Image (spheres, coloured by chain):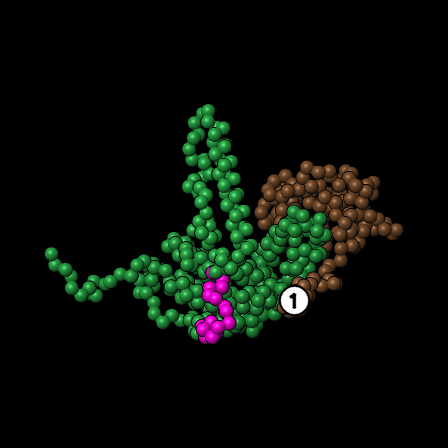
Amino acid sequence: MAAVLGTLGVNLLMFLRFFFPRALYEPKTKFLIGYPSDFGFGVDTKFQKDFRIWVVRNTEGIFVISAICTHLGCTPDWKPSENKFKCPCHGSGYDPEGINFEGPAPRPMDRAHVELNPEGQIVVDLSHLYSWPKGDRSQFGDPGAILRNV
Amino acid sequence: MADTNGHPEKPVDTASPAAGNGSGNGPGNGGSAVAKVLANAKAVQARATEELKETIKAPEKTDVWKSILRVKHDETPRSRALGVLSNVFLHLHPAKINRDAVAYKYTWGMGGMTFYVYITLVFTGTLLMFYYHPSKVIAFRDILYLESDVPFGKLLRNMHRWGAHLMVIMVELHMFRVFLTGSYKKPREFNWVVGVLLLVLTLLLSFTGYLLPDDQLGFWAVTVGTNMARATPLLGHAGPFGPQLGMTPFNDVRFGLLGGSIVDSNALLRAYIWHCVAIPILASAFMVVHFWRVRKDGGISGPAPMMLEREIKDVKKI
């Protein structure tokens, strides 16, 4: 009896482990997006399709917003005429810096790690995110969250 | 009855289900009301402890145990013979049915019609599988191909789509009817539970089929649906106690559903297998049990048998 149960138990664990592969073939999370001089003031959507990010320059510097709504993960649309991001799924709205101001989104959209490589190009790392959870400290000023004076 | 979990009634006061909130709300006696609530709560707790003890001591005496394992399974020739004679496959079709119990006015025929729609879905779904490849880019192209180039492809696809919507609606109406007629009560509680499982499986079939056309609608629906799984307690990386148990986007329950950290080709393939193989098999198995139990619990529940006027032989004249 114990042997049978043990065998079945191990088989169940093996069955469950089967669904978690060791390697994945998903899009790269670290990539180059060009030189800081390529980006003017405001929101740049040219990398939305390839990398699901927006590059934003404001008075402080350049940062990269991960284009994932913090409500349930849809991609919001940039509406230049209204100067905001609007999520088509449940209507969350964000200002041009990705700060939520309407709809069900619980916090601003996350920002990706940015740094300059020796050549002077911007390297974006989507696996390293900076967030601003509600009622918590903003990580948006941390080193790596924004490129200042570029 | 149900509140004693099958054990003989305990001599505990259970007369006030509202836990003493119903009366004594006048000004000045707030203290006694609180005391009453506390006393009731204590009594409930004592009874729960008592029942838990009895359940652990003799689990075979609980309603749950008795509704799953209906009869004795001892090694006597009689038990073994009954094991064959009461076989589920011999009892799917009833020998006779109470006429009043199958009146459409009473049953709405929703259970039978749901089964009919399910058969239609299995049939049209199998035909659709002849033209559908569950991989990115090709999947949506196959849908367009079915719509425009396959003879009757559009008809089959729409039969499958509308049938799926209809099945969800019918299952819910069936449940509504069963609830209204009180058919979930003893001795049919076990079958009600099986029915609830079938409802969940129907909804899962619906949800997994949503992604398969690989269009924007399905893609974002599944994105939203599986993002909720992030917040699963213990098993999701954004849920309560998830991070403490070492959950990340790469090893939690959402990852297991999608086969990746994003809704991609693995997710499509998994949805396809769940939709076409795993859930239909599970649902069919539960349907067999469901229909079998309808017979075993005394047929479709119904009002007391009535006689038609022409069947009344001699009307008493006064």
- The vertical placement of A71 against A27, above or below, is above
The colour of chain B is: green
Can the viewer see residue A5? Answer: yes
Q: Which residues are magenta?
A: B67-84
- The image position of residue A112, as x and y in percent, is 75, 48
Locate residue A74, reporting x and y percent: 63, 51
The answer to whether B243 is drawn above or below residue B207 in the figure is above
Colour applied to chain A: brown
Query: Does B69 lie within the magenta span?
Result: yes
Which residue, as the protein is rendered here, is positioned at the far right? A118
Residue A86 quadrant: top right
Please report the residue visible at 63 percent of the width from the left and 59 percent of the height from the top. B257
Question: Could you tell me the amino acid type at mark 1?
Answer: Ala
User: Residue, x 44% and y 30% (percent of image)?
Assistant: B25
Left or right: B13 in relation to A141 = left
Residue positioned 42% across, 59% down in the render: B188
Residue A78 appears at what percent x and percent y?
65, 47
The percent coordinates of residue B151 (x first, y second) are: 50, 73
Q: Is residue B56 left or right of residue B298?
A: right
Vertical arrangement, residue B195 with respect to residue B149, above or below:
above
Is residue B118 visible in the rendered image? The answer is: no
The residue that mark 1 highlights is A2
Q: Chain of mark 1?
A: A
In the displayed structure image, the side of residue A2 where residue B33 appears, left or right: left
Q: Nearer the viewer, residue B80 or A112?
A: B80
How many numbered markers are drawn? 1
Which residue occupies 65% across, 47% down? B240
Which quadrant holds the C terminus of chain B? bottom left
- Does dot 1 land on a helix, a strand or a loop? helix
Compare residues A110 and B10 and report the one nearer the observer: B10
Left or right: where does residue A80 sit relative to residue B82?
right
